[in-house]
Image (tube, rainbow, N blue to C red):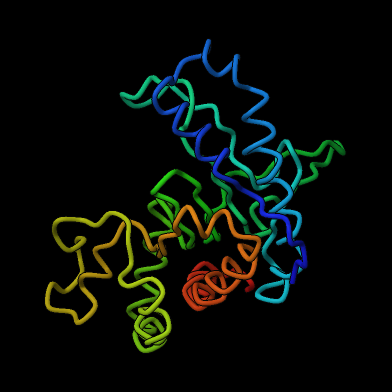
Amino acid sequence: MPKSATPYFTPASFKFLRGLARNNNREWFAAHKSAYEEQLRQPFLRLLGDLAEPLQAISPHYVANPKPVGGSLFRIYRDTRFGGDKTPYKPWGSANLYHQATRAVLRGADGNSGMLGRLDAPSFYLHVQPGESYVGGGLWHPMPESLKRVRAYMLNNPASWKNATRSAAFERVFGELGGESLSRPPKGYDPAHELIEDLKRKDYVCAASLSDAELCSAKLPKLLLQCFDQAAPLLDWLCGALDLEF
């Protein structure tokens, strides 16, 4: 467990994010880029570095990568090519503590390395935003083939699914699963099936809210690891559905 008594995020971190939400433009961000680095990006990277080793106790296949580029921390720059929101920045910080299989490298016959095509795998996630922070994990927006595999696995393993998502400990921390669902049962599935609401899901994720005060506490790593530990049965089950080690 990290022993640092120094908080990662501070009220200044949230002040920066509130300012960005009000002034989501390149001029404002350029003028406040040092605050972004000092109050959000560097503390987040330090947190990820401190989570890396203890995360291995939950699963040796999951990675909290503190690399500034290509690690767990998502870029704050928004991809404006798609969707209606054309603001250039995300008014939040976020990180994906990913399954190591998603970063596998395929070496071709010519000796050159290239990333494998997209691989769906559940992950742990942390979202930092004033008044809207949360921690959790799961499988978000999987490809159709992955979703089909999860549903088939659920039909064949209903008891283990309920054990993973209906325990008192899980519900105490996360309540119900989140994400999007179909309005009708997927084609070919019995509308009367006891798990039909879960079979209708398009995402399999859980989340627990975090207060600004909790984010500013030096005990944040301990709190996050406790939440990751409670989310682990869901991720373990999803890994089983996708033939991944947990």
Of the pair 216 and 183, the residue shown nearer to us: 216
Q: State the residue in front, 186 or 238.
A: 238
Q: Position of residue 229 (x, y in %)?
A: 57, 76
Image position of 4 (left or right of 14): right
Q: At 57% across and 69% down in the image, what residue appears? A: 223
The residue nearer to you, when weighing 78 against 182, is: 78
Give x and y (percent) for residue 164: 43, 81
Judge by depth and name the residue closer to the eye, 39 or 122. Answer: 39
Task: Tell me which residue sits at (42%, 66%) in the image.
Answer: 149
Task: Indicate whether 182 appears above or below 118.
Answer: below
Q: Residue furthest right?
A: 111
User: Could you tell me which residue is drawn at 72 percent across and 55 percent down?
Assistant: 6
Q: Quadrant of the N terminus?
A: bottom right
- Residue 161 against residue 15 in the figure, above or below: below
Left or right side of 171 for 97: right
**Residue with the most extreme top position:** 27
Residue depicted at x 36% and y 89%:
159
Which part of the image, by quadrant, shows the C terminus? Answer: bottom right
Q: Position of residue 178 (x, y in %)?
A: 32, 61
Q: In this figure, what is the number of numbered marks?
A: 0
Is 195 on the left-hand or right-hand side of 184?
Answer: right
**191 sits to left or right of 174:** left
Q: Quadrant of residue 36?
A: top right
Spot occupied by residue 185 in the image (x, y as percentages of width and height): 17, 63
The picture quadrant where one finds residue 174 is: bottom left
